[in-house]
Image (cartoon, helix red, strand yellow):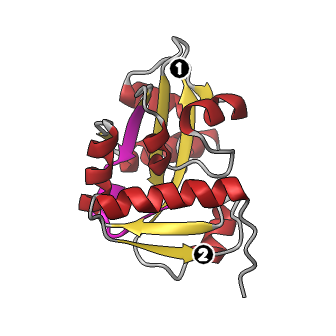
Amino acid sequence: MIVDTLSPEDRAAEARLLALLERLGIGHALHRHAPIFTVEESVSETAHLPGAHTKNLFLKAKDGALLLATCLGHRRIRIADLEKAVGAKRLSFCSPELLGEVLGVRPGSVTPLALMNDRARRVRLILDAQMMEMAPLNFHPLHNAATVALSREGFLAFLCETGHAPETADFDALEALAAAREAERR
């Protein structure tokens, strides 16, 4: 039995998201679960769901540019490799305050679906190319106590509506670089 722990703000944010998906005719499935704060918790709560399970990195470059990288949840990459792959310099994690200001979510609830709150289009979205070949795509619905599943086409239609043109990166290659560096250290 899942206990509803959603705050009124989370409930309202989810309702706005689901209403937008409905308005756009984007099919989706919502799966409630205990709040998830780590990739490990995600595995135990959502492993039974088909498709791509994701994690998200909300980053800020030295020049102030904002980047959201969304990849498969099991990925082990180095930020320095991601910087080179996407042409960014000195990426670091954004503060909770900036996360709330730009995407309207709290730490642990980062999701590309929060781009609906980035009306100024400040965020550059980088997607895992291999993830985008999977179906469905599973994301937080602006909080971490549920997962919403979308088709690739539905997700891309959502991004088009928000005005965010996603870029893809070869996360298999990034993961291979990280593994090679790890092997060199041994």
Q: Residue at x 67, y 53 (%)?
A: 9
Pointer 2: what residue? 32
Tell me how far mark 1 sits from mark 2, CA to CA.
34 Å
SS under mark 1: loop
**Relative to 106, is 46 above or below?**
below
Relative to residue 81, is residue 74 depicted above or below? below
Instruction: Answer with the quarter of the image where residue 127 lies.
Output: top left
Closest to the observer, 73 or 165: 165
Question: Dot 2, crowdedness within 10 Å: few (<14), some or many (≥20)?
Answer: some
Q: Quadrant of the N terminus?
A: bottom right
Judge whether 58 appears above or below 13 on screen. Answer: above
Q: Is residue 140 visible?
A: no
Classify 10 Å Cα crowding around label 1: few (below 14), some (14-19), many (20 and above). Answer: some
Q: Position of residue 71 (x, y in %)?
A: 45, 51
Please identify, in this view, whether the residue under mark 1 or under mark 2 is nearer the observer.
Answer: 2
**What residue lies at 43% left-to-right and 25% top-to-bottom?**
120
Residue at the top extreme? 63
Quarter of the rendering containing residue 169: top left
Q: Which residues are magenta?
A: 124-140
SS assignment at label 2 = strand
| Between 56 and 157, the one nearer to me in the picture | 157
At label 2, the amino acid type is Arg
Return the mark for residue 61.
1
140 relative to 119 in the view: left or right: right
Q: Is residue 130 magenta?
A: yes
Residue 16, x across and y down, in percent = 49, 55
Q: Earlier in the sequence, mark 1 or mark 2?
A: 2
* Residue 114 in view of the camera: yes
* Residue at position x 25%, y 52% in the image: 157
Q: Looking at numbered disc 1 in the image, what kind of residue is underneath it?
A: Ala
**In the image, residue 163 above or below residue 152:** above
